[in-house]
Image: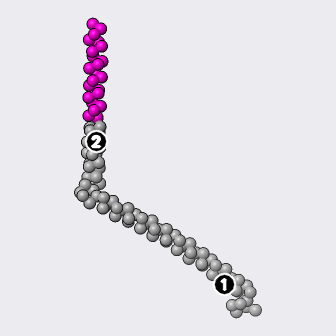
Amino acid sequence: MTEPEHQQPALVENMLLLRREDFDELLDRAAQRGAERCLAHLGLENGSAARDIRELRDLLDAWRDARRTAWQTTIKVVTTGILAALLVGAAIKLKLMGGSQ
């Protein structure tokens, strides 16, 4: 009775070895199907998906550049306004602009 007990684990081990050989192929097929489903879900299943994603990235980069430029412009306008107000205030204080004498 000890021999059949020893043969059974060997059989299970051989089955696992067979599965390991096919495991990579199975994973590749599952990953491919999953990627295709994901792209289809996003509406990018046709051949232009890479171009669409590039265009979306370009659009996002342009949005970020526009936002950064808007903030820089706002800061420049506020800084210029503050400096102009300080200059006008100094000119009035020094009576250079015809204020009351």
* Residue 13, image x, y percentages: 30, 22
What amino acid is found at the position of numbered circle 2 in the picture?
A: Asp
Q: Nearer the viewer, residue 101 or 16?
A: 16
Residue name at image x 29 percent, y 19 percent: 10
**Figure check: 33 above or below 46:** above
> Does the magenta-highlighted stretch encompass residue 59?
no
CB contact under 8 Å: marks 2 and 1: no
Point out the residue furthest to the left here. 46
Crowd rating for badge 1 (residues with CA inside 10 Å; few <14, some 14–19, many 20+):
some
Res 28 label: 2
C-alpha separation, residue under disc 2 versus residue under disc 1 = 73 Å
Left or right, residue 68 beside residue 22:
right
Dot placed on the residue nearer the N-terminal end, 2 or 1: 2
Q: Nearer the viewer, mark 2 or mark 1?
A: 2
Is residue 41 among what the camera can see?
no
What span is colored magenta in the figure?
Answer: 1-23
Residue behind mark 1: 88
